[in-house]
Amino acid sequence: MKITDCLNRKEAAFRAYEKLLESQKDLNAVITPIAPSGSFSDGKLSGVPIAVKDNVSTKGILTTAGSAILQNNIPVFDATIVERLKREGAVIIAKSSLDELSMGSRNLTSFFGEVHNPHDLSRVPGGSSGGSAALVAAGIVPAAIGSDTGDSVRKPASYCGIIGVKPTYGLISRYGIIPYAASLDTVGYFTTNVKDACRMLEVLAGHDEKDMTSSDHRKENYEEELTSDIRGKKVLIMKDVLDAIKDERIRRLFDNVINILKKRGALVEEVCFDKDLLCAAFPVYYTIANAEAVIHHVNLTGIPSGKKEEGEDYEEIITASRTKGFGHNTKKRFMIGAYALQEENREKVLVKARKIRKQISDMVLKKMESADVLLAPSAPKIAPPIKEKARIETDEEFLIADNHMVIENLSGMPGMSMPMGKVEGMPVGVHIAAKLFDEKTMFSVAKAIEEDSVKMFCE
Ligand code: GLN
């Protein structure tokens, strides 16, 4: 479904809302449905039904971040992006499910239950923005909001066969978003096509004085200036990622994409990075993200907002509220974060992780000085079955091929995943990263791929 299928159609949001309620038994993608009122303003998204991840504050509407501790949290204000969406006429019809506090890549840890992939209900949609991804992939809404701290928009986009964009750090305001890790968090979004991805960024991007990390990058006309002319563009291919992927069918789909780009006159080159640094990217991300999460979430005590448990004194109340209020996975991540923050470990764990983060960023940004985009398959596998246990592995397929997209969070670069074909009937994505604030070039490469893959499917 495209934005233009719903634009200025009074009945579109009502129809989407009905479909959404109906889909709930299969997908379980929604925490709070929001019935449309039928009124909306004129603008780039007039009447267009949109789903918003449930870590985005919505005035007067339950906002849980997928956690029991926030199961009765009703914000008194709208996040800046909600204001922007509404100003352009969007109709928000759902608060979509997510991994608890955005901690996960499969959408199995939400207090409100697992979310299912519309392509195969026995599989995960990816996380942590899996509810939003499932709703777009199921054709219920043409666009949805997610957040991406370490690939949480791009991984579900790959698993669900849609577009998922993580813009440059600071380009979209995070005011009113329940954080995971402030130095890595970005608002991202899903669409089904590149043109819609451009329009969404135009609506969402722009300086916000309420967010101190918000950039003052000028407004851009991504949609109007979208071109698929990529002649002379320099495309770097991440050879280390390809080498780490065991499934030959995924490598073959990626070769097709490269052929499209070559045929269109792009200059394609393979690049190898320092292996040790590549392998360190995920552990570095995990250390920093979880340390920051501990700091952000000390205030989740069940007081004054959230679910408060009984106790004799303050200490007992917050201990009981936090013990009951967080799931196992979240507590595990808090332990890791707390370990990194402890005074005796800080230097050798957290400070070291920050130093390596800088080395990884410098390494990639340096290579990008003489290139336009960086390409790799988004993931080495199709969406895993819900029954399969998520595990942290130490092999290159996990560290490099499955988690290379954290590099854009570590460095701030923009990245997007788009469909490049199917394996066993399940979608797989290609990831395109670009220079800081060069979303325009990222979109033009995506557009070129989109045009030719449509042709490939028709022939
Ligand atoms: N895969 C990442 C994780 O599990 C994604 C988290 C995110 O981007 N919010 O930490």
Image (tube, helix red, strand yellow):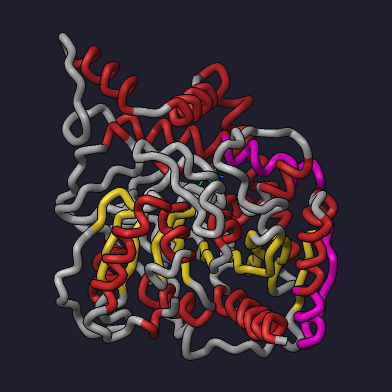
- On the image, the x and y values in percent for residue 234 come to 76, 77
Residue 33 position (above or below residue 104):
below
In the rendered image, the vertical position of residue 393 relative to residue 90, given as above or below: above
Locate residue 14, reporting x and y percent. Answer: 24, 72
Snapshot quadrant of residue 33: bottom left
Residue at 62% over, 68% down? 419
Specify whether 242 is left or right of 368: right
Q: Nearer the viewer, residue 36 or 375?
A: 36
Up/down of 332 relative to 50, above or below: above
Q: Residue at horizontal 40%, vertical 28%?
A: 327
From the viewer's side, name the closer residue of 182 and 222. 222
Residue at the spot 72% in from the left edge and 82% down from the top edge: 456
- Looking at the rendering, in which quadrant would you find the C terminus? bottom right
Magenta highlight range: 257-286
Q: Is residue 223 above or below residue 388?
A: below
Q: Which quadrant of the structure image shows residue 78?
A: bottom left
Which quadrant of the figure contains the N terminus?
A: bottom left
**Which residue extends farthest top?**
312
Q: Does the magenta stretch include residue 272?
A: yes
